[in-house]
Image (cartoon, rainbow, N blue to C red):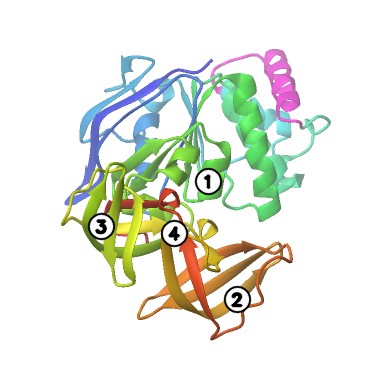
């Protein structure tokens, strides 16, 4: 079974560069936790510190309540799956899976029995005696997972393990990984820059930017209740409207934008005069035809991109960048061509007002 992990004010410096800044969080036993962020944000550095390959410049890492200072990677209750998997291509599948047990001096018969158990766990029945080099990408992925589990870690660390797979196989392996984690009860810590992976698999997600953990929460809350402007624009799409808070009303704030006043949820308790950005997701915007709604923008259609079951409607307000509206391609949408004037609207409950800060560029 898994163990909990605690980071207490953990930072990592490389010369003058700070890769991780004052990270504090607790990952409970048996949780599937993902660190999500762009390349270079510090998420892999956190993984390497947890695994013991590097020591934090300051701060404390505890696994199962034990301080890990001075404990090397071979003595920690962790196993690490690298992005390139690092399998032995000429070894048989079962030999790859049992390699860690061989290093620990376990006899051949016991190694084989354990390997067969794990082969069944990862649904590779009948593949035990094949050279691993003959397997597909998804099968090799499962071998890597089984090999990591063979040494019975309490914590399994996964560094972007699906990045080399094609889209359909990645989607399939997401479900496989989640199912394996649930069956074993091992604590999974997953590193990814792919928000779809994080949202699909994780119990909770830590979103990182420039070495800072910006928000830790469940996938639905990170998507619907982003804590910062970076999270709002990195996780999913968002339409940002910059301005200044002109009034507040209990749970809401009105932001004076270049397209006029807009009202949204004031989750960060901004006050009058604060610089702010109002965000609304494209799927929460719609074309309006005279009905009463909190926020309405006069626009002209720039273009429409068809994505099969969905259409992306790109419109422009006067002097404003593209505003995106996601529409279901169910035959009920209006036939709007480029240059057509239309009105776009959204409710205050579908918008969120956050302090002005840097947006994600990805």
User: Residue 139: percent from the left, percent from the top?
Assistant: 72, 41
Residue topped by disc 1:
83
Q: How many labels were placed on the picture?
A: 4
Residue topped by disc 3:
276
Residue 361 appearing in the image: no
Residue topped by disc 2:
304
Residue at the (22%, 54%) spot, across then down: 247
Which type of secondary structure does the marked residue at label 1 adopt? loop
Check if residue 109 falls in the magenta segment: yes
* Of callouts 1 and 4, the N-terminal one: 1
Bin the neighbour count of mark 1 within 10 Å (Cα to Cα): few under 14, some 14-19, many 20 and up.
some
Between 319 and 87, the residue placed more toward the observer is 319
Q: How far, Cα to Cα, is label 1 from label 4?
A: 30 Å
User: What stretch of residues is rendered in magenta?
Assistant: 103-123
Q: How far, Cα to Cα, is label 2 from label 4?
A: 17 Å
Residue topped by disc 4:
238
User: Residue 330: percent from the left, percent from the top?
Assistant: 73, 62
Do the CB atoms of the residues marked 4 and 3 lie less than 8 Å apart?
no
* Of callouts 1 and 3, the N-terminal one: 1
* Of callouts 1 and 2, the N-terminal one: 1
Query: Which residue is most to the right?
Result: 126
Between marks 1 and 4 in the image, the one whose residue lies nearer the viewer: 4
Between 171 and 126, the residue placed more toward the observer is 171
Q: How far, Cα to Cα, is label 1 from label 2?
A: 38 Å
Viewport quadrant of the C terminus:
bottom left
Q: How far, Cα to Cα, is label 3 from label 2?
A: 29 Å
User: In the displayed structure, would residue 340 be above or below residue 137?
Assistant: below
Bin the neighbour count of mark 2 within 10 Å (Cα to Cα): few under 14, some 14-19, many 20 and up.
some
Bin the neighbour count of mark 4 within 10 Å (Cα to Cα): few under 14, some 14-19, many 20 and up.
many
Q: Quadrant of residue 304?
A: bottom right
């Amino acid at each position: 079974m898994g163990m909990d992990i605690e980071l207490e004010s953990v930072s990592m410096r490389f010369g003058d560069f700070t890769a991780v800044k004052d990270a504090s969080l607790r990952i409970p036993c048996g949780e599937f936790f993902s660190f999500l962020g762009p390349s270079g944000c510090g998420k892999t550095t956190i993984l390497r510190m947890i695994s013991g390959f590097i020591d934090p410049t300051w701060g404390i890492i505890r696994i199962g309540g034990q301080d890990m200072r001075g404990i090397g990677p071979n003595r920690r209750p962790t196993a690490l799956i690298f992005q390139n998997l690092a399998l032995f291509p000429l070894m048989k599948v079962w030999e790859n899976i049992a390699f860690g047990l061989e290093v620990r001096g376990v006899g051949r018969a016991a190694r084989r029995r354990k390997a067969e158990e794990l082969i069944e766990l990862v649904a590779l029945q009948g593949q035990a005696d094949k050279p691993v080099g003959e397997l597909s990408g998804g099968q090799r992925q499962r071998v890597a997972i089984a090999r990591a589990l063979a040494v019975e870690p309490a914590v399994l660390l996964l560094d972007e393990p699906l990045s080399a797979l094609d889209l359909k196989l990645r989607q399939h392996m997401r479900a496989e990984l989640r199912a394996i984690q649930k069956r074993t009860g091992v604590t999974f810590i997953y590193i990814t820059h792919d928000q779809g992976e994080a949202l699909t698999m994780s119990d909770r997600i830590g979103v990182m930017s420039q070495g800072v953990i910006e928000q830790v929460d469940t996938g639905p809350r990170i998507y619907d209740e982003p804590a910062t402007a970076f999270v709002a624009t990195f996780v999913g799409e968002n339409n940002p409207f910059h301005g200044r808070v002109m009034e507040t009303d209990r749970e809401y704030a009105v932001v004076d934008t270049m397209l006029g006043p807009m009202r949204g949820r004031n989750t960060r308790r901004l006050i009058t005069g604060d610089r702010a950005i109002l965000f609304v997701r494209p799927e929460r915007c719609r074309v309006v035809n005279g009905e009463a709604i909190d926020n309405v923008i006069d626009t002209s259609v720039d273009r429409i991109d068809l994505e099969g079951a969905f259409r992306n409607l790109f419109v422009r307000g006067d002097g404003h960048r593209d505003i995106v509206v996601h529409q279901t391609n169910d035959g009920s949408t209006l036939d709007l061509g480029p240059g057509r004037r239309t009105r776009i609207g959204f409710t205050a409950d579908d918008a969120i007002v956050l302090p002005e800060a840097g947006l994600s560029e990805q």
